[in-house]
Amino acid sequence: MRPVLFQVGGWEIPSYPVMLGAGALLLIVLGVYSAGRSGLRRHCVALVLVLGYLAGLVGARSLYVLERLPEASDALGWLTSPAPGGFSLLGGFLFAMGASVFSIRRMRLHAGTLLDSMAVPLCLFGAVGRLGCFLAGCCYGRPTSLPWGVVFPPGSDPALRFGLGMSVHPTQLYEAALLLGTALILAVSAKAVTPAGGQFLRVAVVYLSGRFFLEWTRGAAAHSWLRLRDSQWICLALFLLVLATW
C-alpha cells in the first residue's frame, strides 16, 4: 500500500488519481492508434474517448455514493467532494458506454469497429486503475489464510475493519490479472475473424463473469439481496444484455 506516490515540495501526490490518469492516457493513445489503423477518423475517436472517460468518472462516483446512501448524511456534498473518495467501476462502465454510444451515433462512426479497437486498451485501462486501488488500499478483499494474502499497514481501512495484521484477499490484483490476461488473449488472437463488435463483446463477457465471482472475495461492506450483492446483480443484468446483443 502506497497512498501517496511521491511528493513535490510540500505537495503530496496521491497514487490513485495518478494511476487513473495514467490508465486514461494509455486508453486514449492506444485506442486512437488502434482505431486509426481500422480506418476510423482519429480526431473523432479521441473525442469519443474523452467524453466517455468524463462520463465514466461521473457514473463511477454516482454509483459508489448510491450504494452507500445510508452512510451519507449529505449525499450531494459527498458526490462532489474528493473526500471520502471512491469509485464504482461498473457505474463508470454504464455511463461511459451511454456517452460513447451517443457520440458515436452523432459522429457517424462504425460502432462495431470502434468497440473492437477499444477492447485491449480498455482492459489495460482497467488493470492500471486496479493497481491504483491496491496502492490506495481500497477495494480490498475478505480475510484469508491463503499464502498470497496481503496484510495492509496500521491505519488503513482493511486494518481498521478486520484488525491489525489480518491477511486479506488482494482482490484488486485478482481483477488486474483478469484484465491483463484478457488483453493478452485478445492481442494473440487479434487476427481471428469475428463479426464487428465481437472482440468487445468477448471482453464484456469475460470481465462480467470474472467480476461476478470476484465479488465474493471483496471485503468492503455492500448491500445484498437474495445473497447476491448489488454489483453482482448489475453484472448479471449487463451479462444478459451483452448476450442479447451478441
Image (cartoon, rainbow, N blue to C red):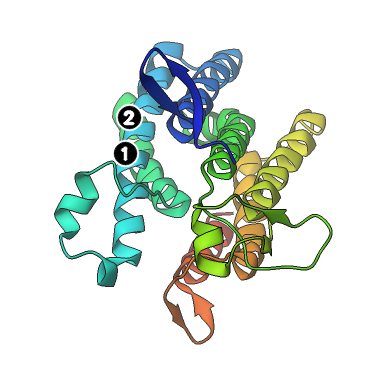
Q: Is residue 114 above or below residue 237?
A: above
Q: Secondary structure at mark 2?
A: helix
How far apart marks 1 and 2 lie (CA) works out to 6 Å
Residue 149 lies in what quarter of the image?
bottom right
Q: Position of residue 12 (x, y in %)?
A: 40, 25
Asked whether 61 or 246 is in front, the reply is: 61
Asked whether 242 or 233 is in front, the reply is: 233
Q: Quick one: quadrant of the N terminus?
A: top right
Residue at 84% in and 59% down: 147
Contact (CB < 8 A) between labels 1 and 2?
Answer: yes
Q: Secondary structure at mark 1?
A: helix
Q: Which residue is mark 2?
A: 51
Q: Amino acid at mark 2?
A: Leu
Q: Is residue 46 above or below residue 142?
A: above
Q: Is residue 82 above or below residue 19?
A: below
Residue 183 lies in what quarter of the image?
top right
Q: Which residue is mark 1?
A: 55
Q: Position of residue 161 (x, y in %)?
A: 51, 67
Looking at the image, residue 167 sits to the left or right of residue 31; the answer is: right
Residue at 53% in and 78% down: 228
Q: Residues within 10 Å of mark 2 (few under 14, many from 20)?
A: some
Is residue 95 visible in the rendered image? The answer is yes
Q: Quick one: quadrant of the C terminus?
A: bottom right
Looking at the image, residue 111 sits to the left or right of residue 200; the answer is: left
Q: Position of residue 71 (x, y in %)?
A: 28, 68
Residue at 51% in and 42% down: 136
Q: Position of residue 223 (x, y in %)?
A: 42, 75
Q: Amino acid at mark 1?
A: Ala
Q: Residues within 10 Å of mark 1 (few under 14, many from 20)?
A: many
Residue at 51% in and 23% down: 22
